[in-house]
Amino acid sequence: MAETGALRSLDMVEVNPALGSDSKDVERTADMGNMLISSMLGQRLL
Amino acid sequence: MLQQLGITAFTMREIDKHGIAKVMELSLAQLVNSSDSSLHVSFDIDALCPTWSGLTSQTLVFSLIQKRNVLSRPSPDSRQKGKGNLLVAAHLMLNRQGAEHRHDCLRRSDDARGQLHHRIGAHSVLHYYIAMQ
């Protein structure tokens, strides 16, 4: 996605940590959203 | 509805057959066809995990991000079985001229494998679905 250079806008929807039953779920969900966004913006492992 | 609106859509059938890399390649080739192409992405993270408690395997979560070809691989964590956190739905929409967009949802559960429930936005150009189990 990032490699296309065409991404202009991005929704990451339904991220609602308030629904989490414990802190790990909340953290994992938030981290997942962050990772997905970062990846689409060009973050890579190497 | 997809066919009526001329929307190109990829489901798990194509992803299982070709892999996500190929599906992404086909998707982007169709959507990004000039140097000034613009994309809007609407990503429904809710579809990753229908129940929040289903996010139990950090390895699997990371695998999705770092290795997009892990799709359909059996979960290394037996606790995952039957929990139904199978699916990531993502939606790419061509956003020319600031076109209005809506986001769509897709969910799939273990006991309803293959039964996809869509809410289709009229302005969507392409959907692709990533599932893992």
Image (tube, rainbow, N blue to C red):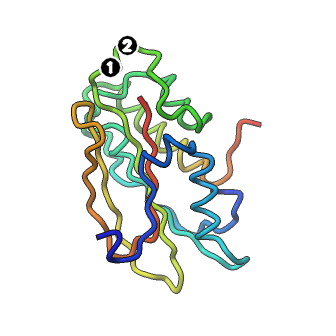
Could you say whether the residue bearing mark 1 is in a helix, strand or loop? loop
Amino acid type, label 1: Lys
Contact check, label 2 and label 1, Cβ < 8 Å = yes
Q: Residues within 10 Å of mark 1 (few under 14, many from 20)?
A: some
Residue A24 x/y as whole percent: 38, 24
Q: Residues within 10 Å of mark 2 (few under 14, many from 20)?
A: few
What's the residue at 33%, 61% (across, down)?
B104
> Height in image: B101 above or below A14?
below
Q: Chain of mark 2?
A: B
What's the residue at 66%, 57% (across, down)?
A2
> Horizontal placement of B92 versus A42: left or right?
left
Mark 2 highlights which residue?
B78
Taking the view exactly as shown, the residue that stands out farthest to the top is B78
Q: Chain of mark 1?
A: B
Which of the 4 quarters of the picture holds residue B85? top left
Which is nearer the eye, B3 or B103?
B3
> Height in image: B71 above or below B81?
below
Residue B81, numbered label? 1
Could you say whether the residue bearing mark 2 is in a helix, strand or loop? helix
> Height in image: A20 above or below A3?
above
> Height in image: A5 above or below A24?
below
Taking the view exactly as shown, the residue that stands out farthest to the right is A46
